[in-house]
Amino acid sequence: MGLVDEFENRLERVVEGVFSKAFRSDVEPAELGRRLLREMEAGRSVSVGAVYVPNDFVIRLAPNDFARFEGLIPTLRTEFGTLLKTNAGQRRWRLPGPINVRFEEDESLKGGKFEVEGMHLAADPSDPYSAQPDVLVHLGTNQSWNLDSDEITLGRSSSNGIVVDDANASRNHAQLSRRADEWWITDLDSTNGTLVNDAMIKERRLNHGDRIKIGATEIEYREAASGIT
């Protein structure tokens, strides 16, 4: 099942659970989701060897449709944000900042009509693609490493982006990969395995504050900025 199919099935359950037969509108939530995806793709921009896409979206609805959607807006903002973030991650597109989806009432629109606009909204308006990088912090020495490239390997070998000086670490132990604005860690078939929050993993998305253990070395992942607003 594709990303859009999964999204539409989940939306059907949400709408049925929250509104049941009371929700009636000429505008369907799934239709808005598809338009958001098209707007993200249409807004692609290449900068410094990476493809950036819009992260700030506004959905404009006619007054009657806005009134029908109003109670569902908080849920839809979360669902649409997840859809857009997943889509960007699967295509390895970069986001200039956290994803935000807003709804606005537009009296110039007739019932059943809507508009969707996507914009690049960066953390620093003076530089559209500058942002503080996420970091890893060694919990023993407090040494930190900026995560400023799309793939970073960790291990005992000096050829790694992050060298782990630990006899229990493999030469090439694990790899960090950036997918959209998320970091994932993958164990590279290491001898002693990679743990995140004391759980053995093969691959896992990292959240702020997660603790990675390689051999006897503990490293904490810290986000410079977080998630969906």
Image (tube, rainbow, N blue to C red):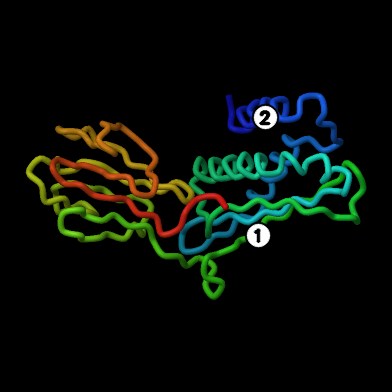
Amino acid beneath label 2? Val
Answer with left or right where residue 214 lies relative to residue 2.
left
Name which of mark 2 and mark 1 comes first in the sequence. 2
Q: Residue furthest bottom?
A: 126
Indicate left or right for 10 with 162 as reference: right
In percent of the image, x 85 and y 55: which residue is there?
Answer: 106
Q: Is 126 rendered above or below residue 66?
A: below
Quarter placement of the N terminus? top right
Which one is nearer the viewer's eye here, 154 or 13?
13
Q: Which of the 4 image quarters holds residue 28?
A: top right
Horizontal side of residue 28 vs 120, given as left or right:
right
- Disc 1, SS: strand
Image position, residue 145 (x, y; %):
27, 59
Q: Relative to 78, say whether 103 is above or below.
A: below
Total of numbered circles in the picture? 2
In x, y percent, where is residue 196?
A: 28, 38
**SS at circle 2:** helix
When the figure is inspected, residue 3 is found, relative to residue 144, above or below; the finding is above
Q: Most extreme residue toward the left, as rendered?
A: 167
Residue picked out by circle 2:
14
| Circle 2 residues within 10 Å: few <14, some 14–19, many ≥20 | some
- Marker disc for residue 119: 1
Q: Residue at x 32, y 45 (%)?
A: 210
Q: Residue at x 14, y 40 (%)?
A: 215
